[in-house]
Amino acid sequence: MPIPLFFLLASPPQGGTIIDQAIAAHRARKAYSVGITVGSVIGNQSLAESWSLGFQPPTKVLLQKKIAGKVVTAFWMNGDKFVAYDPIGKEIVFRKAPIAGPVVNRMANALGGIDDAISVQLSADTLAGFLKPFKQVTGWAVAQNASVTSLSREAKLAKGRSFTRLDFSTRSHLLTGITLVGPGSRLLWSYAYGPAPSRLEFRPAPGTKTVRGFTGHATVGKSDPKGKALVESTAHAYNGLLSAVFTVSGSTGTSTVWISGKSYREKQAVWEWSYTKGALTLRNQQNGRTYRGKCKPGDVPGYLLKIRAPMEPMLQSLIKGKNPLSTWVLPIMSIKSTGSVQGGEIAADAVELRTKYLDISLLIRRDNHLLENVGSRTKDDAGKVLSESHREFKYQSVNQPVSAEAFAISGPNTLPLSMLGK
């Protein structure tokens, strides 16, 4: 995830020695294990994830996503072998991993992208690149105790204030946390280091089925059979989605989406973008300025965040090779069928998914089993609703041919992607 520019005000170096010690400590590691927690809020988009990462030289990597301490997805790379594993649905996907280049690049290539919070743990060079701008920041306050050494800094901005804190282990010098807070955004990373694995291995559970892509599991909570069957039918429908054109409208605005194979396009109110044949094109519809360049699929969301035009979450899942339903359906949720809806020629089934702090309402079409509507409500400990959001999907076509011209965006004076935001 790119760093907002207001955290990187250039000035003489300060705190550089502490940062250099951290980079050297990460570079000196051999085998290691670390727990990773990522939290971010940018505008109306929020993210909260927990991961565990194990590495054993030269190329063994085990990355596991967790919810409430339970592993819900695992990714294993060993040489040219890459495995994606769903332990709840007992499904496994096998792929070839690149055999050349740094481990972090090979893992990102196999995954279709990797979060910066993870990549800085897989590569000391990536960590050095990430921390380099902070070495040029002045005004650090240094605090130290037996456990943690912190660099912190506040800055006054035209529209508020920013706060930055970098935490390091006093004993090992390893990075243990990053906090970046600014107007309309918040980024929190934390790292908990475990013992170095002596023999890193991966074994799927007996009875695991080899599939082309994850179907998606409904729940490990309480569910009624009809609700669970409806959610699983939707997971199957998205797993088999080859092409589509649809419009998404809701609390965060309206956009139109085109999908065909590995080509993607989204037209928002101000920006439109297209990713096809390994190239990303972005066009500002207000001033006509266009940017184009080669990039990896997993890098596209970062470019869109840089221009404050976050990608539609469903599309973000698809471009990363994930089932979009995983955005809303968490393994700890209970699922309940709540009836049916008839609107014009569209018949749909309603499903409620619930946890203590989050409720999701799905309206599932009967014709193609895709989502017609999604609503979410976050709650506090007392069950009071803190925030609500919704999305409505209107489909122009599903699994019908989409012409290559649909992904062509052109404009005068096309600039390289490196000029974006300048």
Image: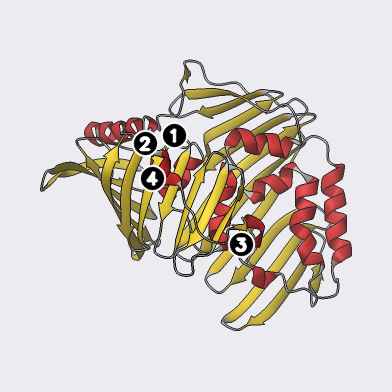
Residue 261 — which label? 1
Label 3 with label 2: CB-CB less than 8 Å:
no
Residue 420 — which label? 3
Q: Secondary structure at mark 4?
A: strand
Mark 3: amino acid: Leu
Which residue lies under the disc numbered 2?
243
User: Residue 57's image quarter?
Assistant: top right
Classify the position of the C terminus by image quarter.
Answer: bottom right
* Residue 390 screen position, x and y as percent: 31, 57
Q: How far is disc 3 from disc 2 in space, using C-alphas? A: 29 Å
Which residue lies under the disc numbered 4?
258
* Residue 231 screen position, x and y as percent: 30, 36
Label 4 with label 2: CB-CB less than 8 Å:
no
Q: Sequence-wise, which precedes: disc 2 or disc 1?
A: 2
Q: How far is disc 1 from disc 4 in space, using C-alphas? A: 10 Å
Residue drawn where x is 52% and y is 24% of the image: 93
